[in-house]
Image: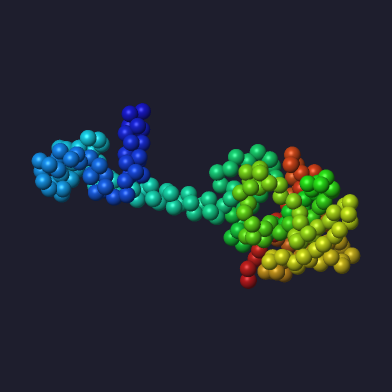
Amino acid sequence: MEEDNAAAALDNIVTEFHTYEDFLDSQITSLDLYYLEDEELARQLVELGYRGSGEVLKREEFETRKAAAEASRLSKRSQQKTLASVGKELKDNFLKALAEREEANRSGKMTSIIFIRDRNALGQEISGYIDYSHRLKTEEFDPYFNGKKRLLPRATDLSFYNWETQVSTSNASANYQVIADNSSGLLFKNKTDRKILNVDPKATPGDNSSRTPLQSELYSQVVIYDHITRRT
């Protein structure tokens, strides 16, 4: 316990002071400078533990802890900047599934299509297919993972249908072309490997693709279609 407290105290020091000299100066009193008349000598005495009013911390340990703290800060910042799901407490199956696929969809290893059926803010039943990778790159996902916002299909997504107004739209995305006029139903053609993804629940999804229905407390119906991109 004492070791943990000591370590925490040293970590606080490297966080508080920008340089080792700043730390040494914080330990020097005006009386020290009056008698010694030499700032560098006063710093040396603090470093050796002869003067000062706080923790004794060697330069090497300060620099090591400072570098470790900075590396940790940059790592967390980079990870949080890249993955919106990092550090979030996710309870719903759908949000957990999105988190599991986030890195792969951001990096291009996978391009997932999300089918969602639910009601909008007006209480109207809507459904549609969302290009997850495209949405990740064009909007902030923190509000979705925080539970402050619901992921719903829009008229600008791959496919959208309002069951009450009967408004229907379809749009190509950065990853998929929409093939709507097909006897097999709605199809999506991946722009990278040109593979066809079939979203008909009675058919097989296609090469390198899978279909995952999910039980969610947040939506009436959710299905995720994962396509593993094969780059040639």
Q: Position of residue 216 (x, y in %)?
A: 74, 41
How many marks overall?
0
Q: Is residue 189 left or right of residue 98?
A: right
The answer to whether residue 7 is above or below residue 17 is: above
The answer to whether residue 190 is above or below residue 25 is: below
Q: Nearer the viewer, residue 206 or 38?
A: 38
Q: Is residue 202 left or right of residue 225?
A: right
At horizontal 75% and vertical 60% (from top left) the residue drawn is 157
Question: Which residue in the rendered view is the most extreme toward the bottom?
Answer: 232
At horizontal 20% and vertical 41% (from top left) the residue drawn is 28
Res 81 seen here: yes
Q: Position of residue 53 (x, y in %)?
A: 22, 35
Q: Position of residue 67 (x, y in %)?
A: 35, 50
Q: How has the structure been colored for display?
A: rainbow
Q: Nearer the viewer, residue 148 or 191?
A: 148
The quadrant holding residue 92 is top right
Q: Work out which quarter of the rendered image holds the C terminus and state it.
A: bottom right
Res 100 seen here: no
The quadrant holding residue 131 is bottom right
Q: Is residue 225 left or right of residue 43?
A: right
At horizontal 73% and vertical 57% (from top left) the residue drawn is 130
Q: Work out which quarter of the rendered image holds the N terminus and state it.
A: top left
The quadrant holding residue 105 is bottom right
Q: Position of residue 209 (x, y in %)?
A: 72, 58
At horizontal 49% and vertical 54% (from top left) the residue drawn is 78
